[in-house]
Image (spheres, helix red, strand yellow):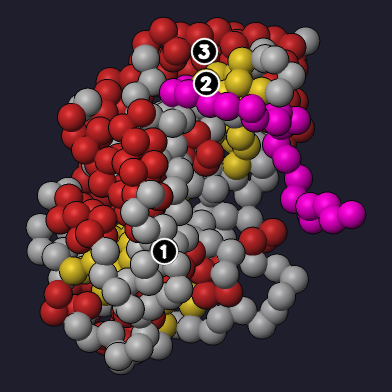
Amino acid sequence: MATLSPILKQATPVVVDRAAGSWIYATDGKKYLDFTTGIGVTSTGHCHPDVVAAAREQVGKIVHAQYTTVMHKPLLQLTEKLGEFLPAGLDSVFYATTGAEAVEASIRLARMATGRPNIISFHGGFHGRTVGAASLTTAGTKFRSGFAPIMGGVNISPFPHAYRYGWDEDTAVAFALKELDHLLQTISTPADTAGFIIEPVLGDGGYIPTPPAFLEGLRERADRHGIVFIVDEVQAGVGRTGKFWGHDWADVRPDIVITAKGLASGYPISAIAAPTALMAKAWPGSQGGTYGGNAVAAAAGVATLEVIDRENLVSNARDKGKELRAGLENLQPDFAVIGNVRGRGLMQGVEFTTAAGTPDSATALAVQQAAVGAELLLLTCGPYGNVIRIIPPLNVTSDEIQSGLSRFRQALKTATT
């Protein structure tokens, strides 16, 4: 009898029977408020009727039309629709299946386009578990250890995490940019540096927004040195932060945008977008994949973008995110274990610390588990596992936000008394 790998540890004991909107109905008869959204994937909620209808219709036409063999309409439609949201000038798209695949494609493109070997990523970033993507990842050692040697040509520069350093944001940004300049002077000369890659909000690294001034500093250095500026929007993109792209909070335009997760409301599809002139520098045969741009996933992606647009879900994410953030901050005075509340839109993190200010992983886990008892589903993240991330769907209602806050308060009381 086969079983799942023992290394796959479930964050909750819930077994799903069905789901709708913000709610999961489990086989135990309980109804759970899902503030995990499959790690930020079910952007339009579970089983949005328009997305279900689009996928169901496509399944009856063709499921797998490998898009370098034959083209299919949903991918053409998705490309046209996605183009309405892409940054100006990023008019060429390559599709894959997972975020990690798209990350790998982006670094391959940057190296081929520049003829340079090195990539610089930033402390706390998460970019995937495949060898190249894991080599860029420093959200925790569990993602990159135990299978050395990892990919060469990667250098890690400090991220301006003001709370960790105990500084104000301006000081943290100035420090991180100064250290990046030092790295370019001492480790990876610009002439050897193909790309910078960064998340506009760190995901697994602790739900830490990247300061706009830091993104703008990266853009300036990329322009000055001919370095490709890659923004990993896998988790922060598609409306999650209250703007369509997480980098829209800054005055920057990336050279490559990576997207996945919320793009198709749960159907696996990812993409990178770049200017045609840059994309054309990829070597023949370097882009492809058996399942990339799947027809059913593409149809779901078109429906997802239409729902987000028609139902004004980006503005809803911004408005409900403010409501969620205010509620979380109101909890802080009552629970000393909450060291920091942060995030953007419907991508909020609560960091737990001890009285001495050190990471409190045990309390974070206890609260997350107590939340299951309150029928609220949450996840932890961060290098120390001491951050609870709260990720409702983009169409969450005020009533659901308030219910989630009430259940979270109940979990805090249960875990800390």
Sequence-first disc among 2 and 3: 2
Image location of residue 233, percent across then percent down: 35, 53
Q: Residue at x 43, y 75 (%)?
A: 289
Work out whether residue 381 can be spotted. Answer: yes
- Residue kind at label 2, given as amino acid type: Trp
Vertical arrangement, residue 405 with respect to residue 287, above or below: above
Image location of residue 275, percent across then percent down: 15, 71
Residue at the spot of label 2: 23
Image location of residue 205, percent across then percent down: 54, 49
Q: Nearer the viewer, mark 2 or mark 3?
A: 2
Asked whether the beta carbons under mark 2 and mark 3 sit within 8 Å of each other, the answer is: no
Vertical arrangement, residue 174 with respect to residue 64, above or below: above
Sequence-first disc among 1 and 2: 2
Q: Which mark is residue 405?
A: 3
Asked whether the beta carbons under mark 1 and mark 2 sit within 8 Å of each other, the answer is: no
How far is mark 2 from mark 3, CA to CA? Answer: 15 Å
- Residue kind at label 1, given as amino acid type: His
Count neighbours of disc 1 (C-alpha within 10 A) and say few if under 14, some if 14 to 19, many if 20 or more. Answer: some
Q: Residue at x 56, y 81 (%)?
A: 151
Residue at the spot of label 1: 64
Tell me which segment is drawn in magenta: 1-22
Image location of residue 67, percent across then percent down: 32, 71
Vertical arrangement, residue 188 with respect to residue 67, above or below: below
